[in-house]
Image (cartoon, coloured by chain):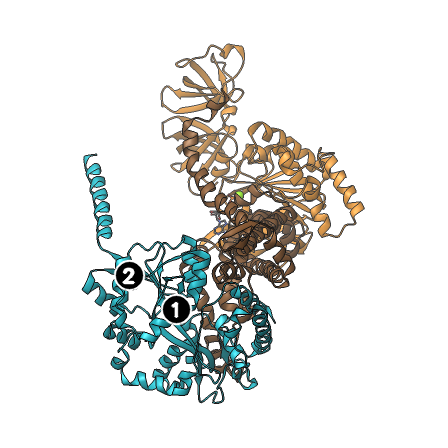
Amino acid sequence: MPVLECASLTKRFADFTAVDNVSMAVEQGSFYSILGPSGCGKTTLMRMLAGFERQDSGNIRIEGKSMTGVAPNRRPVNMVFQHLALFPNMSVAGNIAYGLKRRNTPSAERERRVGEVLERVGLAGSGNKRIEQLSGGQQQRVAIARCLVLNPQVLLLDEPLGALDLKLREHMKIELKRLQSAFGTTFIYITHDQSEALVMSDRVAVMNHGRFEQVGSPQDLYYRPGSAFVAGFVGDNNRWQGVIEQRVGAKVRVRTEQGLPVEAQAAAGFQGGVGDAVELFVRPEAIRVQLQDGGGEAENRLQARVIEIVFDGARSRLQLRQADSAQEILVNLPHTPEFATLGPGDRLYLSWHAHQCSLFTVGAGR
Amino acid sequence: MKSKVTKLAGLLLGVAAVTSLQVQAETLRLLTWGGYAPQEVIELFQQETGIEVKVTKSNNEDMISKLRATGGAGFDLAQPSQDRISSAQAEFNIYRPIDLARIKSDLFIPSMLEATVKNTSIGDKVYGVPHVWGTSGLVVNRKAAPDVRDYTDLCDDALAGRVSYRLKRPTLIAFAFALGEDPFAAYGDRAQYARILEKVSARLTECKPNVKKYWSGSDDLLNLIRSGEVVAAMAWDAGGWKLNKEDPDTTFVAPKSGALGWIDTFALPRKSKAEDAAYQWINFVMRPDIAAKITAESSYFTASKGASALVEKEQTRRFEESFPQAAIDNIKWYPPVPAGLEEMEGKVLDRIKAHR
Amino acid sequence: MKRSQFGLGFWLLLAPLLLWLVLLILLPHVDLLLISLRLRSGPGTYRFSLHHYAEFFTEPLYWRTFLRTAIMSLLATLLTLLIAFPLAYYIAKMMRGRAKQLLFLLCLIPFWVSELVRTYGWMILLRESGVVSGLLQWSGLTGAPLEMLYNDAAIMVGLVYTAMLFMVVPLITTLDSLDDSLIEAGYDLGGNGWNLLWEVVVPHAMPGIVSGCIVVFMLTLGNYLTPTLLGGKDSLWFTEQIYTQFITRFNWEQGSAFGILLLLLSSLMVWLGLRLSGQSFTQVMGR
Ligand SMILES: Nc1ncnc2c1ncn2[C@@H]1O[C@H](COP(=O)(O)OP(=O)(O)O)[C@@H](O)[C@H]1O
Ligand SMILES: [Mg+2]
């Protein structure tokens, strides 16, 4: 049985629907992320789970018990706030002990548990420090320890890494995942950063305009996006508009607006027929790049010239243009030696498989 | 740029013009009591002499304090009571002598002028001439408090919470007389005076629960009586007569042990800047026609000879009703206060105030 | 070489401030102290003496009035805090947008008129022939007119009313800066309203509370009009005593001694307040 379940949750502010008919089930001990652009309703959804907002309809169950009418301080969930919300007038230990005090835990046991949790989050001996003496990452861990010490059924985290700098964020991603598996607590994690969701999560729900677009494993979302929105939001993609020219079973040929013919493979349930407008996605990293025509069995093979090299270290990109159609294509820059002298105007040979394309009819999802 | 400079120059010229105008128009800064310088009289004076009069309302203690703080500057003419001049002058040197030759003495009631001159002299220097006189006694709503005849009647249980008086030296003096003492006779004998004060203090302390409020300004008191919250009070005669105009039941009653007579004077502050104007003002307001206007306006009587003939009949009737001849003869006129007494009185007043 | 660190411009800019401090604050107090330390030994002559301070301690009337003023001021400060805190919390935390500004403005309205007018307003309400008494009689709650003026409760009402703004403003400012998520975090961790108030809200608002209390205490201690007008025959306020000494007794020496004592008291109270609440002066006045 899932530890947290909600059915048809809806929340409106005046005539604006912030959360629209969302259902979800979170398994015990899993790391569940909700990924969506800013303003899509993630925080509102989480505040309903924590009890700070009342849903307009639908219900929330935690361990099978309905949470309707249960106040935030009585729910078996705890929340790590977007800006941490550590109590500035208390020491680190004071912050962590706050919830235990509210439960009338005897002071000896309280001290022991505070010490224990501090050690587990790697802050042993920092109990007497003031909050502002800690670095951003340490504060992060205190905020989490403050909740985990209470052994909540579910820990809710609202973009907790948002305020950290890039390097620290990368580090904390790993750290958070490690903490989660060490404590075995169920995490529900909100983020607008797809990389955070992909790195840490067991399951990810992609949210847009108050609705869940797709729920699945990171691999599902990456390899088998369920909608044009997911394909565009998760990972980078070449996104081309086009029209179906030919369809034979799952084999589909699309001609993009720029006139490039692309062979694609329709996923199960794809309804588009000849003449239908579609959106087609190809990931830059799925495209093979060669200096000579290497042949091979890939359905899509073409030549293109370099327009621009967008240097970004390991994530460097090449902006290309196919000669006949003027279709622009984004591919990864291979870091092998033969590409070291590459410059604008150079010719490259590209190829990719039909099944590496994602295809969606315009306006109707799949 | 140019326009800014011209504007600034214009502004400066304007300021200069205004200030010079102010210097040209003579002004008389008068430190006085409410009602002593009605607007009508001020306007008549300005028409006649071109002098502008600026009035600051005050009372005895305040006048002395103000003049003391500046060594007698800031005002051109003051109006302290005649009994408060010589001691203040001896202590603080805040007045300058009056040149009697510049006063039209035939405008004054001779006996009053003579008494004031005598009481306000130090050596052969004269510091005050009389202006307004009046008495302190009882203002009574005769329907609600028919039995109030003397100061001590204010302490009657029947009037609990319905009486008022000031917590100032006149009240001490009045109660002393009502208790059968003669405080004025004891002015020269501090031990005797202390004994009398002790007695008065005991009585006033005992009387405190009867008091609604110690009044502080005459408007304050008049409103208390008008609203019916207070039915008997120790107060100035003029106030009683003012109320009598509105309600015939209320009037001024001369107490059995004697009303306390005071005379407010004209005195020249030591650093007066408009001495001429001050003398002009004195001679102007003492004219019978002007003095009668002041009486009509404020119910106060003045030391102007012949003014009473011009006062309206009603006013005279009220005066005579409050003051039969015997009551006039019984008025206790304040002699000059010797230095040091006020300090003794002050402590007594403080203690009464502090008692609960 | 070091001097050039503060150039001519610096001193020119500082000059008005220094002048203001010395002329308007320091000099009068020094003068007050000097006057309080002299005793009149004859008409216009004086000698050094501690007489006026001795007088204060030996005359029960004076130190009792002093004590009473201090205690009533403390009480008024406390009452103002108790009333202003929920109000400020409501305005700062519960209200949004226009309603918030409107309520805040409403708090300011009484201060558009002078203290005298405000106090007379209370007198019209509370006096025996006044509005409240009239209403009570009209509703049949009392048979006879009721005097509500001229007692300590009336003084307290007037003092609290006068001081309210000076408490509400610093409180709203500090409470406004309290992140809502701190309160929510407290709830989320199992706290309830009461311990959140004590452990989160009050510690955060402390600088505002202390600065509000200091200002209100000093204002109340130095108030003259309200206690004398509303207190009637039993008002007994120390500033009234100072006024009496200066104006009706012509005893500037005693009045000055009282003034210095009052100054000492308020300085002591400010120090104690900061000490007890663990705040620093700059922290509090920065609000
Ligand atoms: N209390 C509120 N009143 C009105 N609108 C709100 C309120 N809270 C959130 N919203 C609106 O709901 C939408 C979703 O907000 P939120 O849940 O905070 O988004 P996210 O966390 O995904 O960025 C936003 O458009 C926001 O303006
Ligand atoms: Mg959010």
Relative to A30, does residue C123 appear above or below in the rendering?
A: below
Q: Residues within 10 Å of mark 1 (few under 14, many from 20)?
A: some
| Amino acid at circle 2 | Ala
Q: Residues within 10 Å of mark 2 (few under 14, many from 20)?
A: many
**The chain shown in brown is which?**
C
| Amino acid at circle 1 | Lys
Asked if marks 1 and 2 fall on the same chain, the answer is yes
Relative to A321, does residue A102 appear above or below in the rendering?
A: below
How many numbered discs?
2
Q: Label 2 lies in what chain?
A: B
SS at badge 1: helix
**The chain shown in orange is which?**
A
SS at badge 2: helix
**The chain shown in cyan is which?**
B
- Residue at numbered disc 2: B278
Name the mark nearer the viewer: 1 or 2.
1
Q: Position of residue C118 (x, y in %)?
A: 44, 64
Q: Toward the viewer: B95 or C118?
A: B95
